[in-house]
Image (tube, rainbow, N blue to C red):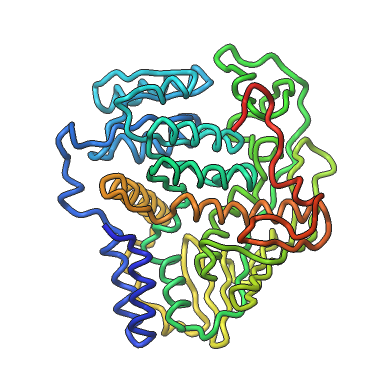
Amino acid sequence: MSDPLRVSRRKFVQQGAGSTAAMLAAPFALAAPSAARAARPAASDRVVVGLIGPGDFGRRQHLKKLLLPNPRVRVAAVADVDQLHREQAALDVQARTGQKISIYKDFRDLLDRPDIDAVVIAVPDHWHALAAIAALEAGKDVYCEKPLSLTIEQGRAMVAAARRYGRVFQTGSQQRSDTHYFRQAHELVRSGAIGRLTKVAVHIGGGPAGVWQRPQTPPPSLDWNFWLGPAPYVDYTPNRCHYLFRWFADYSGGSITDHGAHQNDIAQWIIGADDSGPTKVEGTGTFHENGPSDVPARFHVEFTYGRHGNVPLIFTSDPSPRGGNLEIYGTDGWLSVSRRRILAEHPEVLTADPLPHDYQARLTDSYVRHYANWLDCIQSRERPVCDVEIGHRSATICHLAGIALRLRRPLNWDPTAEEFIDDAPANRLLNRPMRGPWHL
């Protein structure tokens, strides 16, 4: 099955802007799973999946909403360093299917299972590269949550491993499978509906400071040392763990890499830089003075895409003038896009909305289609709509922003060599050491 986005972009180039309305409708059918695929296949034809990280999002979204209801999937095992998480996930599977599954604390034991075809990785960001590369080496196809990596070099190592072992690797940036708003914005830009692209602005919020907590004894269910893994050792506090890991630089990059990975993914897609990146980055930001969070609180970063028509990408925690996450500017008008709606300076360029206006229905639809694309590609061995290379390039934008904010000066970036030009201090931030015995 061909990648629906590549098909759409190729047809736009061939047919031009005159057939915009017809082409905007085309990707919806291409992205949807066929009726035959949606029917429950024989057990031998289903993809046997292991879930690594059935914690908050892994259990609530991936397991309960996407894996268990999917007739094309059989969940065979889960792995989590928190006993409560893995046991509750097993109970969820049993309640839904009547089957008992295997549970593991160490994800490597799950990967040793020859019957498991693929894994979904929903662990904190600092574990993504280790878990994904181990899965690829074990011959598993991979769906890994965004942001793909903790560092730029880790992301490149994930791409190299996926290519080396010939595995299908979908990044969990499900907005790529959005059936209307983000896709429509992309096709409108590609068709010339707003003229020549002149600027893209990504607007997301900042992050909380959190509160200081005294070190505590970890809960009996949690292997805290294993949870930290490659990150530096610190004593346990509840607000470092599980969902709140996002606000600590040892494990993530705050809102810059969390929500930023979603929106910058679409921005790069619109600019046409899926396999490339900017050539310059500079910005200003602030960090929390009172609170344990050590990721940027507020920021304004500008990227220059010198190899893509000198289109600037603005990435900021400031609110949007029109309420969108992406504000897209062209010589003939603007578009304002979020998960909830699309607006245009000239509304006549927009087609009728074919989907319900319910936000949760839209979000679920994007996830379901993103999974369907991954499963289709596991069968066809084609690259999925948000292949590991795309996920890596989208995460790279976020990491470049974080590095520029910490160094507080402009940086010149070579997107081909994936290094800063003549800048040893900046290049030292492309990766970070791992605490032993963990290593790539």
Q: Residue at position x 52%, y 46% from top?
A: 146
Q: Residue at position x 72%, y 66% from top?
A: 280
User: In which quarter of the view is residue 366 placed?
Assistant: bottom left
User: What quarter of the picture does the N terminus occupy?
Assistant: bottom left
Q: Residue at position x 57%, y 35% from top?
A: 124
Give x and y (percent) for residue 54.
45, 29
User: What quarter of the picture does the C terminus occupy?
Assistant: top right
Report whether 312 appears left or right of 274: right
Give x and y (percent) for residue 47.
27, 36
Towards the viewer: 48 or 424: 424
Give x and y (percent) for residue 192.
46, 83
- Exactly how many numbered labels are in the figure? 0
Q: Residue at position x 32%, y 33% from top?
A: 117
Report whether 83 appears left or right of 5: right
User: In which quarter of the view is residue 412 placed?
Assistant: bottom right
Report whether 14 appears left or right of 233: left
Give x and y (percent) for residue 21.
33, 80
* Residue 270 sits above or below residue 236 on the image: below
Towards the viewer: 35 or 204: 35
Towards the viewer: 126 or 340: 126
User: In which quarter of the view is residue 128 placed?
Assistant: top right
* Residue 171 sits above or below residue 180 on the image: above
* Residue 185 sits above or below residue 416 on the image: below
